[in-house]
Amino acid sequence: MRDFSQIFKRLWYLMIQKLPEYIDKINKEKNDGLIIKPFTNTELIQGNLKIPYFDINFDEAEQGIKDRIIGYIRYKLTFELFLEKNCKAPILEFCRYRDAIENMLEEDDFEYWDHYNMKSIGINKIELTVLVEY
């Protein structure tokens, strides 16, 4: 069985170490005056962060009948993004962060997850469901 802590640590690594380059790519691609900033997170556990920053929360692990037969478990996590309140285009800003995260996950070659699904929940949350072989 794949240890969830390894998956969680990988997500933190990607968000802290790799995401800034994807944010930079999005800014260069769009080049329309809206510049999104890298997150201020630098460690797994932190306090008193400056905006923008993120938090990852583990929501649940589930294994349906079909999943048990084929040997998978689904982990559901939520990314909560804390962004500047005075942004002129908050929805667009959120979408750019979401796109940067999605591009990063698509290009990552982490061997533990076989499939993932991302969906937006409101203006500042992204739900990530990761399918992992056990």
Image: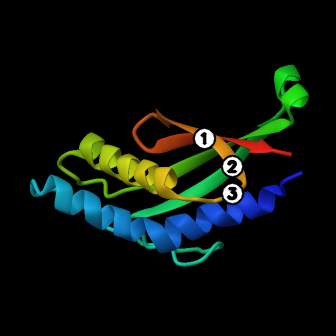
Seen in the picture, residue 130 relative to 28 is either above or below; the reply is above
Q: Secondary structure at mark 3?
A: loop
Q: Secondary structure at mark 1?
A: strand
Residue where numbered disc 2 is placed: 113
Which residue of the protein is positioned furthest toward the bottom in this rendering? 42
Tell me the residue at 44%/53% (across/down).
101
- The label shown at residue 36 is none
Earlier along the polypeptide chain: callout 1 or callout 3?
A: 3
**How far is disc 1 from disc 3 in space, using C-alphas?**
12 Å
Q: Position of residue 61 (x, y in %)?
A: 80, 39
Which residue of the protein is positioned furthest toward the left in this rendering? 32
Residue where numbered disc 3 is placed: 111
In the rendered structure, which amino acid carries the disc numbered 2?
Trp
Q: Is residue 116 left or right of residue 113?
A: left
In the rendered structure, which amino acid carries the disc numbered 3?
Glu
Residue 44, image quadrant: bottom right
Tell me the residue at 41%/51% (across/down).
103
Q: Secondary structure at mark 2?
A: strand
